[in-house]
Image (spheres, grey):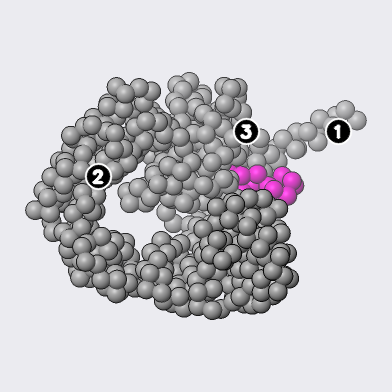
Amino acid sequence: MPNMKKIAWILLLGCFMCTAFAQKAPKWMEKQKKAIVTVTTYKADGTALHNGVGFFIDEDGTMLSAYSLFKDAQKATVTDGNGAVYPVERVLGADELYDVIKLKVRTPRKVSCLRVVSRPLVQGQTVYLLPFVKGKEKVASYGAGKVEEVTKLKDSYHYYKLSFPLQVDWLNAPVLDEEGEVFGLAQDDASGKKEASYAVSAAYGENLSVSSSDVFNSVYTSIGIKKAWPSDREQAKIMTYLMENTQDAKTFLESLDDFVATFPGWWESYARRASHYALRRKELATDDAGVTRCLDKAMADEKRAIELAEDKGDALYEYARLIYNVAMSDTSLNNPDWSITRSEEVLKEAIQKKNAPSFHQLQGDIYFSQGKYVPAYDEYMIVNHSGEGNANAWYMAAKSKSLQTGVNIGEVIQLLDSAVAHCGNPLTAQAAPVLLERIDWKLRLMQYKEAVADYDLYFQALNGKVADNFYYYREQAKYRMDDLDGALADIRQAMSIAPQVAMYPAEEASILIRQKKYDEALKSLEKAIALVPDFAACYRLRGVCYQRMGKMAEAKKALEKAKELGDPAAEKLLK
């Protein structure tokens, strides 16, 4: 019986040896093994999280491995066959679903790497799995077999089923073709049968990249290791704006430093960092000296941006705009380099280089801030007649016109009409201040119906997200155009939102009095007086109600109370 067990074990071992070594080990294995490394990921406290395998796919340290090794990791290192340890510097791309990640490893020199097969393999093709092997050791065991199935992965990439089972330490190892080129990353049989193994396309992993939208993607946010910037610098710039809302000022400065280091020859990277230094200087510094240093660094970045920019006009304009924003946001800043005057000087230099409409819009803003409303209007109208007119330029033209001597209200409203027309359709919150301005001018002309129509547009622009005072102001306009039912509905809506405001039931009573609903009006006045016992106007309105109801004694008493509380109209009513 013992001999039978021994014979069975020998036969089983023989079967395994046939699977693993059905063919003689290719000569290239000894060379290719140098590209394979072990991976160790770490938690935030420095304790090890996972251990696994990866492999370099270029000599500059780009590596493929399993995403699952890096999820929740804050740091990672790789160790080559000779025991040299290198830090993982960046995540270049990742896919949690297919469990593959592309990384940049910081290495002091060029490394051995595997060339990725660009063409897909076919069923029946011979393949080899090469596990991690220490430097001086010979490749003693490896996987060898055939491609059993080829299935579509994504786009032009594929997923492969291989004829040999996967040993534990073979997971995530490279799978190569007969030429020694890598085509896949080894993965386990998810069914649990362990009869075969699988490989996800290495070409797919090689082409993974980070996009600007990935800043909020949990696939990336679950990894604490620094992420790569998109290769397209405009996309990278967009990512900085997304990151700004999720990072504190100092952390974001580190991100911008990395952004500049990644795109050192692009003027916009320096302009982007200059803006952060200048506008968030008080968050970056702890004292006045630190604030000054931030402004100096911003200026240095802007000068570097101007040096690098092919279009000097654009770079000078950005600098002028930054100076303007700093000066307008901090009137206590006594620094001639960051003043409205300096902004205008830089802008005039920009206009000499490039006469762009946006430059004139900034010039209009500068003139407006200086109280020079006539030239400000002229500058805004240059923009509006250029073909690049926008809602803000038309709005500011209206504001400038309204502040000139001898204002023509009709002209102001026409300018505001153009501003609204440039706000898009449907209207959004951008249109809200323009509509309020137009409403104000229409009310001055007693165009109450038109004003109510604008209130309705305002309501739509904000998707109905308005406060109680909106309903109060619209009620006032409806009241004046004799739409008493509409006015009553609005003031009651205001009351439902803010029942503690005494003005609203008082206003409700005023409407009810005009509708000759005196009993209801008295009830509304009681609500207002309960909220504000010395509300003089409410006692006057109570007196009016009683007088119209023929209750003269009660009317006199109410009016005397109103007079006592200082209501100027009460005495006339008493007479």
Q: Residue furthest right?
A: 1
Residue 557 place in picture, x, y as percent? 68, 59
Report, in whole angstroms, how far the alpha carbon at label 1 lies from the one at label 3: 31 Å
For residue 4, the mark is 1
Q: Amino acid at mark 1?
A: Met
Q: In this picture, which residue range is highlighted in magenta?
A: 183-199
Does residue 153 appear in this view? no
* Upstream in sequence: badge 1 or badge 2: 1
| Residue 503 counted in the magenta span | no
Q: Is residue 518 left or right of residue 388?
A: right
Q: Amino acid at mark 2?
A: Tyr
Q: Nearer the viewer, mark 1 or mark 2?
A: 2
The secondary structure type at the circle numbered 1 is helix
Residue 247 place in picture, x, y as percent? 46, 37
Q: Residue at x 61, y 68 (%)?
A: 510
Task: Find disc 3 in the rendering and name its residue.
Answer: 169
How packed is label 3: few (under 14 Cα within 10 Å), some, or many (20 or more)?
few
Q: Nearer the viewer, mark 1 or mark 3?
A: 3
* Upstream in sequence: badge 2 or badge 3: 3
405 vs 184, nearest the viewer: 405
For residue 324, the mark is 2
